[in-house]
Amino acid sequence: VDDVGILVMNQIIPTQSAFVHYVFWDKRFRGREELIKAMMRYVMDKYMLHRLWTEIPLIATSALQAADRVGLVREGRKRSAILYKGVWVDTNIYGILREDLELAERTRDLGNPPVRTVCYKCGEVYEKHHTPRPKSVA
């Protein structure tokens, strides 16, 4: 396998959680979703972790989209979290539980992946399956 990037893990609490950060040398995420899921599964199994979490700057649109595609759940926003080119930028905080990753693996071939939504009143994560809208005829 060619060297395409690196996975960095820190703030590790054994059997509980870890902060993860993925970097691809060419900055391309599309088409690497299965690789990201495999890396998450590997570190969860190797270190017996219950959850992984990450922060993604709002200016990193391709990384934000990739987070949704691999099944990460948006858990919140950190305001003015990083300094980028002299401007403070917010980050979104994402997490994935072991059971979320298992669900993503089971539904990857369905063609209608679950959409996870967080209730901001109670914090419960629920999912609904969406079906693509039919294309309108012009």
Image: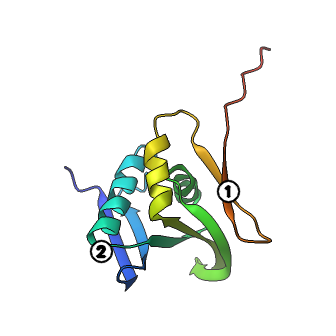
Compared to 44, does 27 lie above or below?
A: above
On the image, the x and y values in percent for residue 68 come to: 57, 54
Horizontally, residue 31 falls left or right of residue 69, namely left
Residue drawn 49% across the image and 72% down it: 53
The answer to whether residue 66 is visible is yes
Query: How many numbered discs sit on the rendered protein?
Result: 2
Distance of label 1 from label 2 (alpha carbons)? 27 Å
Which amino acid lies under the numbered mark 1 shown in the image of this protein? Tyr
- Residue that lies at the very extreme toward the left in this rendered image: 1
Asked whether 19 or 16 is in front, the reply is 16
Q: Residues within 10 Å of mark 1 (few under 14, many from 20)?
A: few
User: Is label 1 in a helix, a strand or a loop?
Assistant: strand
On the image, the x and y values in percent for residue 44 come to: 35, 67
Horizontally, residue 46 falls left or right of residue 88, namely left
Compared to 30, does 110 lie above or below?
A: above
User: Is label 2 in a helix, a strand or a loop?
Assistant: loop
Residue drawn 44% across the image and 63% down it: 98
On the image, the x and y values in percent for residue 132 come to: 67, 31
Q: Earlier in the sequence, mark 1 or mark 2?
A: 2
Q: Quadrant of residue 20?
A: bottom left
- Residue that lies at the very extreme toward the top in this rendered image: 137
Picture quarter with the C terminus:
top right
Residue at the disc numbered 2: 47
Q: Quadrant of residue 60?
A: bottom right
Horizontally, residue 127 falls left or right of residue 36, namely right
Q: Looking at the image, do the residues carrying marks 1 and 2 touch, with CB atoms under 8 Å apart?
A: no
Residue 77, which numbered label?
none
Residue at the disc numbered 1: 126
Q: Residues within 10 Å of mark 2 (few under 14, many from 20)?
A: some
